[in-house]
Image: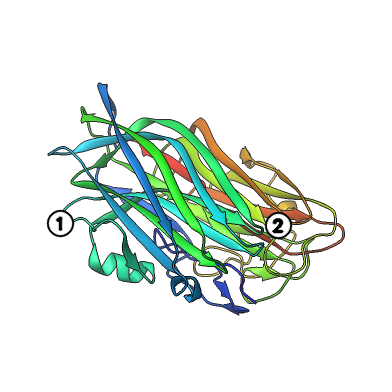
């Protein structure tokens, strides 16, 4: 039986489920710090980011396969502004597969050859230590056919990029799929440079089966991840996607609905919630009822499903929320499946944060 996993694209962690084994990766909270986040000039350009990979029969027997593709940038530092297009995952068989599609920049040094293949992210970052992920989009597909998400967003401040862009197509599953990114990147020449960060409010949990920390047989429970605000500043946007899918155990026999929420808790994370050292709850609980009454509800993305399917949605929500050092972002994951069944719930939404100058 093959299940799913949280990938460590940006050195985050969670449960990793493969042939009924759960393993921890590198860290449960992703905090990506850029040397600078830039407001951008009015003169913008576009760069096609098109990549496609079809697994060979041998590759489809591996636990994980990651393909890399490079796209050159003009000399000097540029400023990433957003993406338009689509990512897709196509399977010829009615079995569970998933792909994580990541846009990154390799700030210096040699860029990967198109179609380079790696077995995991540790090998990628060993080979390219200056590789910085910008955004990931998760796709899941429990059936034959094509799973896809349309992407369209422009951020209010730019992210620094240079040298080349890299698209990573990461597969896990049970068949010889095709993964494709058909994207257009908007970018500009840097005009100013206040510092900034992306906060990793992304994570993955499994409902319907216990396979280790971050999973539960009880579909009435929920999970949580906590992210600490490092200094005073402003939350500017939430961007990414969410994919909640049936997988390799019996699905809910009828309708099901997932809850995907982000709350801001001023002053710090609740102390009575059993977070592990990585900042996420290894056991399911009734965590929605433990959100403080003074918390601010920043994002809500409920997804509806019926029997075997993937419920997916692109997310871009602008924000202008002042925060202080030590404030806490809580990402919650819940499921309403009255008749039981397995759901793999993954949130790849990150929070754009601009520290105070």
Horizontally, residue 183 falls left or right of residue 202, namely left
Q: Is mark 1 on a helix, strand or loop?
A: loop
Q: Which residue is drawn at 51% across and 48% down?
A: 88
Write down the residue under mark 1.
Answer: 109
Q: Which residue is drawn at 58% across and 51% down?
A: 330
Residue 83 higher or lower than 59, as above or below: above
Q: Position of residue 167 (x, y in %)?
A: 35, 51
Q: Position of residue 273 (x, y in %)?
A: 64, 62
Quadrant location, the C terminus? top left
Could you tell me how far apart the alpha carbons at marks 1 and 2 are, in whole angstroms?
45 Å
Residue 63 higher or lower than 10, as above or below: below
Q: Where is residue 261 in the image (x, y as percent from the top left)?
A: 64, 46
Write down the residue under mark 2.
Answer: 287
Q: Residue at x 49, y 71 (%)?
A: 60
Residue 117 higher or lower than 137, as above or below: below
Q: Which colour scheme is used?
A: rainbow
Residue 301 higher or lower than 30, as above or below: above
Name the foreground residue: 7 vs 192.
Answer: 7
Mark 1 vs 2, N-terminal side? 1
In which quarter of the view is residue 161 placed? top left
Question: In this view of the protein, can residue 153 be seen by the observer?
Answer: yes
Horizontally, residue 106 falls left or right of residue 122, namely left
In which quarter of the view is residue 31 placed? bottom left
- Residue at the extreme top: 42
């Amino acid at each position: 039986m093959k299940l799913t996993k949280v990938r460590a694209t940006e050195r985050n962690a969670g449960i990793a489920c493969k042939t009924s084994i759960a393993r921890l990766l590198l860290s449960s909270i992703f905090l990506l710090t850029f040397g600078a986040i830039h407001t951008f000039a009015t003169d913008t350009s576009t760069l096609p980011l098109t990549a496609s990979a079809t697994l060979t029969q041998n590759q489809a027997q591996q636990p994980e396969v990651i393909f890399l593709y490079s796209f050159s940038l003009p000399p000097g530092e540029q400023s990433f502004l957003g993406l338009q297009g689509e990512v897709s995952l196509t399977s010829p068989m009615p079995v569970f597969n998933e792909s994580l599609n990541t846009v990154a920049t390799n700030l210096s040094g040699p860029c990967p050859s198109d179609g380079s293949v790696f077995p995991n992210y540790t090998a990628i970052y060993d080979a390219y230590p200056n590789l910085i992920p910008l955004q990931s989009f998760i796709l899941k597909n429990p059936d034959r056919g094509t799973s896809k998400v349309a992407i369209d967003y422009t951020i209010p401040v730019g992210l620094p990029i240079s040298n080349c862009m890299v698209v990573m197509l990461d597969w896990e599953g049970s068949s010889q799929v095709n993964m494709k990114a058909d994207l257009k990147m908007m970018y500009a020449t840097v005009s100013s440079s206040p510092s900034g960060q992306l906060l990793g409010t992304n994570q993955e949990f499994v409902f319907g089966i216990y396979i280790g920390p971050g999973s539960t047989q009880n579909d009435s429970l929920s999970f949580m991840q906590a992210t600490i605000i490092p200094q005073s500043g402003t939350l500017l946007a939430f961007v990414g996607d969410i994919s909640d899918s049936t997988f390799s155990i019996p699905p809910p026999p009828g309708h099901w609905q997932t809850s995907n929420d982000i709350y801001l808790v001023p002053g710090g994370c609740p102390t009575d919630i059993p977070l592990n050292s990585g900042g996420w709850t290894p056991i399911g609980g009734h965590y929605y009822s433990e959100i403080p009454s003074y918390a601010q509800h920043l994002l809500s993305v409920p997804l509806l499903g019926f029997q075997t399917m993937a419920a997916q949605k692109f997310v871009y929500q602008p924000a202008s929320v002042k925060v202080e050092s030590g404030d806490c972002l809580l990402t919650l994951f819940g499921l309403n499946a009255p008749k039981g069944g397995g759901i793999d719930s993954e949130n790849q939404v990150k929070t754009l944060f601009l520290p105070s100058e």
